[in-house]
Image (cartoon, helix red, strand yellow):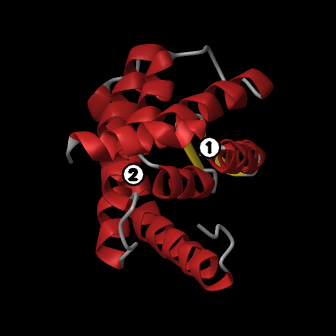
Amino acid sequence: MNRRYWSESLAEFKKIKTLTGAAMLIALAVILSFVTIAPSDYLRIGLAFLPKEVMAALFGPIVGMVGNGITDIIQYALKPTGPYFFGWTFNTMLIGLFGGLILYKKEVKLWRVLVVNGFEALVNIFLATWWISILYGNGFMALFPVRAVKNLIQYPINVILFYAVWKIIEREKVFRT
């Protein structure tokens, strides 16, 4: 990643197409965040990751990071599920940054999707579990096995869903450049 790559990613903010596309994807992510399965207070399964990952792939690591952060704050403002904690926003921003680094201006291949979603699973297994243990006073090691199993089960599902959605976006030329 050279200086030009980062300046191109930052320059995405100057494009009306980027701003409107990112706004639509943020809105979609917020809507999808209301459709989650929550078998317990510590486990949530949803589809809000899809538009956030698409945003990072289309508009780059900086837009992915900022857009994911905005999405998280809007989601919390509309439907708080506990105290606001910047750790959750940090996690989603980190995932948007990484997703943009791996997918932006590159052909979206299965191995790239595996890497991005693997990183997201690791962030959710380790960092998110740590945040839960800090927030709610539960022991990290007590939460770790359940959250690891949940994320390891969700990982291939997320990979298949994103890859399928991306192939539809490519085939239908939803975001023509």
Q: Secondary structure at mark 2?
A: helix
Q: Is residue 45 or residue 42 the one in the foreground? A: 45
Q: Residue furthest bottom?
A: 171
Q: Is residue 156 or residue 68 the one in the foreground? A: 68
Q: Nearer the viewer, mark 2 or mark 1?
A: 1
Give the labeled residue for mark 1: 15
Q: Position of residue 141 (x, y in %)?
A: 27, 33
Q: Residue furthest left?
A: 2
Left or right, 163 with reference to 6: right
Amino acid marked by disc 2: Gly
**Numbered badge on residue 99:** 2
User: Do we see residue 80 in this rendering?
Assistant: yes
Left or right, 43 with reference to 128: right
Image quadrant of residue 43?
Answer: top right
**In the displayed structure, would residue 130 be above or below residue 6?**
above
Q: Is residue 42 or residue 165 the one in the foreground? A: 165
Dot 1 surroundings within 10 Å: few (below 14), some, or many (20 or more)? few
Q: Residue, x 41% and y 54% (percent of image)? A: 151
Left or right, 66 with reference to 75: left
Amino acid marked by disc 1: Lys
Image quadrant of residue 30?
Answer: top right
Q: Position of residue 174 (x, y in %)?
A: 69, 72
**In the displayed structure, would residue 83 be above or below residue 122?**
above
Q: Position of residue 137 (x, y in %)?
A: 41, 15
Name the quarter where the C terminus is drawn.
bottom right
Q: Residue, x 61% and y 14% (percent of image)? A: 83
